[in-house]
Image (tube, rainbow, N blue to C red):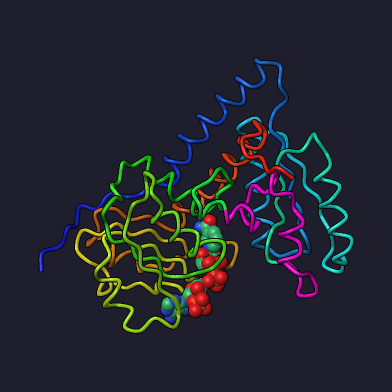
Amino acid sequence: METTSTFRLLDGKAISAAYRQDIAREVEQLRAAGKRAPHLSAILVGANGASETYVASKIKNCKEVGFESSLFRFPDTVTEAELLDKINSINNDSSIDGLLVQLPLPKHISVQRITETISPEKDVDGFHPLNQGRMVQNLPCYLPATPYGIMLMLEHEGITTAGKHCVVIGRSNIVGMPMSILMSRNADPGNATVTLCHSRSTDLSAITRTADILIAAIGKPRFVTSDMVKEGAVVIDVGIIRIEDSSTKSGYRITGDVDFENVAPKCSYISPVPGGVGLMTIVGLLKNTLRAAKGEVKFSF
Ligand code: NAP
């Protein structure tokens, strides 16, 4: 079988930089109009290495586009009541536009209770059920940052999604499920015919081989192999997995859900890990925060 071999890289670094530039310009315009800069708050619990890195990167990106940011740290012995108190005080603080609580949280804290306590008007991660319900109905809302970032990536690269078969592997509330909804919505990008796969799907390869657009959000290193991919497919790798590697300074390296080296030659487009979707997630978060500062999503209660 002939291989495409001239795949195009979905370069998260370059694409996210273009979006960040637009966001920075909008912040300047807000400031010029006498308004304050958008303000994102993050809550970080415990000392999880990956969470530290993600939050530091979010704060750094806020600075770069001219946002205000604030970080509230708690030890992993924090009680749920203490966290809920902090969230409520941020909900009532009119100088803060967006709030995220970095996951994962210690086992004694209910992620659902935390998620539902964040005001849906400040829910810039897009995890609140009210935002997700509105997303399903194609109403104004904050989209979950990672699927939103992927839609922006597709839009930026002018990739046609209408009428295509999109296969999503993974059905989490934060990535796979909303991704499947966004790709099937009557919107552009969107209008795809979507199949959502998970660990109970049978003959997964037979399904993925029919995908024009394949989105992998599983969390298993190099799970998607070349025999699972159709010639000319667009492949988007959401996975971020830390693998021990004594040859690196940190002692680990990051890999994705896709066996990039062997899959890429079959693709029309493919996103790398690192340097792909992760950077677009931050763009999704920044855009949501900018929209929050502009009061674009309102709930009437
Ligand atoms: P998750 O909640 O663990 O969900 C994983 C999904 O994969 C589940 O729906 C699971 O199916 C499915 N799955 C597991 N094994 C499978 C198999 N053998 N065949 C088919 N499906 C299988 O993970 P997540 O939060 O969605 O994250 C997925 C990956 O994306 C992780 O590596 C995470 O670190 C990464 N991530 C990256 C970003 C980014 O910005 N790039 C953002 C968020 C997450 P069941 O539902 O049946 O268990």
Along the horizontal axis of the image, is 183 left or right of 230? right
Q: Can you tell which quarter of the image residue 66 is in?
A: top right
* Percent x, y of residue 160: 28, 47
Q: Does the magenta segment cover residue 65?
A: no
Residue at the left extreme? 1
Q: Which residue is drawn at 29% across and 53% down?
A: 269
Residue 290 visible in rendering? yes
Please identify the residue farthest to the front as the structure is shown.
300
Q: In which quarter of the image is residue 246?
A: bottom right
* Viewer-closest of 30 and 295: 295
In this rendering, is residue 272 above or below 38? below
On the question of residue 242 being in view, the answer is: no
- Residue drawn at the location 38% of the way across and 58% of the way down: 236
Residue 22 rendering spot, x and y as whole percentages: 50, 29
Q: Is residue 178 above or below residue 30?
A: below
* Residue 48 falls in image quadrant: bottom right
Task: Tell me residue 248's x, y (percent).
Answer: 54, 64
Q: Where is residue 96 in the image (x, y as percent from the top left)?
A: 77, 38
Q: Is residue 149 above or below residue 245?
A: above
Q: Residue at x 44, y 83 (%)?
A: 200
68 or 99: which is nearer to us?
A: 99
Quadrant containing the N terminus in the rendered view: bottom left
Read off the magenta span.
Answer: 105-133
Please check the rendered image and state whether residue 132 is part of the magenta-colored stretch, yes or no.
yes
